[in-house]
Amino acid sequence: MRAHLVQHDVAWEDPAANRRRVGELLASRGLQPGELVVLPEMFATGFSMDAGRTAEPVAGPTHAFCGDLARNHGVHVLAGIATRHDDGLPRNDAVAFDPAGRAVARFTKLHPYTLGNEGEHYTPGDAVVTFEWGGFCVCPLICYDLRFAGTFRAGLDAGADLFVVIANFPASRQAHWHTLLRARAIEYQAYAVGVNRVGNDPNVTYAGGSAVYDPAGTPVLEADDGEGVHTADLDPRAVTDSRDKFPAWREH
């Protein structure tokens, strides 16, 4: 199955501009039905702590854009969206849309980034979620969650064989990004996909580096620091073969 990792330069707190840019980047990709498109954490706003202004309702315009993108191309979409829920609290969400444009899974970031005061502005989630895509059981996670191996273990217990981490991961810790993604793939003998942004916000520089590692930790894709869409082929049989031949994943 083919996944498209959208690594764009996020315009600060400008959802309309970011939705338009994502559309432009994908317009020439020749998306095929059933493929997966992945957008970074808070792709429409950047990693803004002005959650009262930037978070949108579940039925808001960024959700509608992602649903339309999925439906118009017949693809699955996983996107990071700052969302206000029925209780009024903003959350840092990863939302999966099916080819009919329906939101089929919603994950709220479990570990707000403490050093960036994220926990003062966004309420954390309380559980992992999964959704089905192309023979995979996909577990979406968000940025700082990458540092917590137990979260991946919970995903494994839920049946995950493909972890997708969407992020605004800073350039200053780019080596950590690749090392941790690769380690999670090896630990749980699963694909680890990371989708990061590029460019700058008022506080941080981002170096992209979106990547895919197979269940042996072998790089399938390692992107540079430029804006673009990076495409990789993933095979569910690689997970099955790895786990059957060397079932260390059962020991974690």
Image: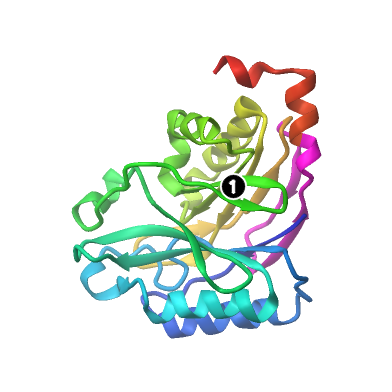
Left or right: 159 in relation to 115: right
Quadrant where the C terminus is found in the figure? top right
Which residues, given as a range, are shown in magenta? 217-238
> Residue 96: x and y, percent?
52, 61
What's the residue at 72%, 65% (across, down)? 34
Q: Residue at x 77, y 27 (%)?
A: 242
Q: Which residue is label 1 attached to?
A: 138
Residue for point 28% across, 45% down: 115
Q: Locate the N terminus and report the quarter of the image it occupies.
A: bottom right
Please indicate whether residue 220 sits to the left or right of residue 66 in the image: right
Secondary element type, mark 1: strand
Q: Is residue 231 magenta?
A: yes
Residue drawn at point x = 21 percent, y = 58 percent:
121
As drawn, 55 above or below 210: below
**Quadrant of residue 51 in the image?**
bottom left
Give how far across and how far down residue 32 sits, in percent: 78, 71
Residue 238 quadrant:
top right
Q: Nearer the viewer, residue 12 or 151?
A: 151
Q: Locate residue 247, reporting x and y percent.
A: 70, 18
What type is the residue that disc 1 sits on? Val
Q: Is 236 drawn above or below residue 18 in the view shown?
A: above
- Between 216 and 154, the one lying in front of the other is 154
Q: Position of residue 231 (x, y in %)?
A: 75, 60
Q: Quadrant of residue 245?
A: top right
Local crowd at mark 1 within 10 Å, few (<14), some, or many (≥20)?
many
Camera-side residue of 40 and 150: 150
